[in-house]
Image: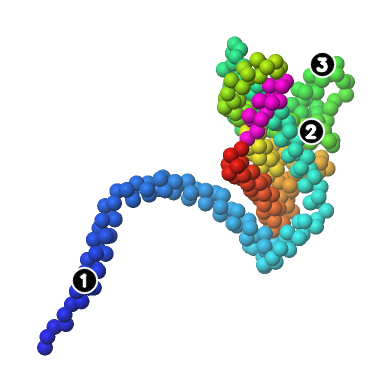
Amino acid sequence: MMAARPDVAALRDFGNRRESMTRWRFDWSTREKLVPFCFLAPSFAALAVVSLYPMAHALFISFHADGVGSVGRFVGLEQYERVLSSDYFPRVMRISVLWTVGNVMFVLAAGLATALMLDRNFPGRALARAMFILPWAMPYVAAGLIWGWMFDYEFGVLNYVIRSAGLGESKVGFLLACPDALISLTSVSVWKLFPLGTVMFLAGLQTIPSDHYEAARVDGAGPVLCLWYITLPGLRNVTIMLTLLITIWTFGRAFTIIFLLTEGGPAGCTETIVIRSYLEAFKFFHLGAASAIGVIVLLISLAFSIAYLAYAYRREVSGG
C-alpha cells in the first residue's frame, strides 16, 4: 500500500508564510513604528482610568433612576427631561453664562494689558514676569482660603482697607449679598486665570514681525493705530484659543473657588451649573440628575470645541 503523496503546493505555501513571519519578526522598521505607541500606552491607560471610565459611568447613570446602594432601573431620557424642566435650570444657566462671560472678558483684557506691559524693555522685567505668574501657580484651595479671609465681613483685610482709606464707614458684605458675591467670585477667578492670558499673549506678541510696527511708525501711525491694526489682528488666533480655554474652564470645570467661598450662596446667586451638579449628587442624593447635568455640561463644552476646530480648519484650508 503506497503512502499518500504530500501536497507540494500546500508545503510551499506554508514555507512562504513561515518565511514572511520570520522576516517580519526581525523587521526593525516595524518595531520602530510601534515604539511611540508603547511610550504613549501608559498615558492612554491613565487617561482611560481617570477620564474615560468616569465619563462613561456618568453617562450610564444618567439613563437610570436613583437607587439605594446601586443603580436603579433604566428610565431613558427621563433624568434629562427632569433637569431641563426644573425650576433651577434656567437660573443656574443664567448665572453660569454671566460667570463665564465675565471671566472671559476680564481675563482677555487683563492678560492683554499685562502682556503689552511685560513685552517692553524695562529694569526688572524678568522679576515682574515671575511675579505675574504667581497667581496661576498658586493652588486653588490655597487661593480660595486666602481670599475667603480677605473677604471676611468682621475681620477681612479688604473691609479694614476701605475704612482706613475713608472710602466708607459701614462694612461691605462681599460674599453675603447679590450681586456682590458673584462679582467678588469673578474677581478672584480673573485674578487666578489672567496669568494664563498673559503668557499666551506674550507668546503671540513674539510672532508679530517688528517690521510691521516700524513701517506703521514711518507712515505716522501712533500706538493706538498700531494696536488696532497690527497687534490685535496678529493676536487673533491666540485670542480665539484663549477664549475657548477660559470658556470651557469657567463654564464646565470651575468649582473650587465658588465652593470654598460661597457654596453657591447666598440664596443661590452664585450657584453655577457645576455647583448644582455637586448639590444634586451629594446634598440631595440625586445621582441620575447630577450625571445628566454633567453630560449636558460636557456636550456644551464639546460644542465650543467643535466650533473652534471648524474655524481653524476653514482658516487652514483657505490659507487665511
Image quadrant in which the N terminus is located: bottom left
Q: CA distance from mark 1 to mark 2?
A: 81 Å
Left or right of residue 90, residue 144 in this image: left
Q: Amino acid at mark 1?
A: Leu
Left or right of residue 269, residue 100 in this image: left
Residue matched to label 2: 183
| Residue 164 location (% of width, % of height) | 82, 16
Residue matched to label 1: 11
Q: Amino acid at mark 2?
A: Ile
- The mark nearer the N terminus, 2 or 3, is 3
Does the image show residue 186? Answer: yes
Left or right of residue 303, residue 152 in this image: right
Q: Which residue is at the far front?
A: 219
| Residue 138 location (% of width, % of height) | 61, 29
Part of the protein shown in magenta:
224-237
Vertical relation: 57 (above or below) 181: below
Question: Which SS class for mark 3?
Answer: helix
Q: Amino acid at mark 3?
A: Ser
Type of secondary structure dominating the magenta stretch: helix
Residue 125 image-quadrant placement: top right
Q: Nearer the viewer, mark 1 or mark 2?
A: 1
Residue matched to label 3: 164
- The mark nearer the N terminus, 3 or 1, is 1
Question: Which SS class for mark 1?
Answer: helix
Q: Which residue is at the far bottom?
A: 1
- The mark nearer the N terminus, 1 or 2, is 1
Tell me the crowding category of disc 2: few under 14, some 14 to 19, or many 20 or more residues within 10 angstroms, Cα based. some
* Labels in figure, total: 3
| Residue 98 location (% of width, % of height) | 78, 40
Tell me the crowding category of disc 1: few under 14, some 14 to 19, or many 20 or more residues within 10 angstroms, Cα based. few
| Residue 5 location (% of width, % of height) | 16, 80
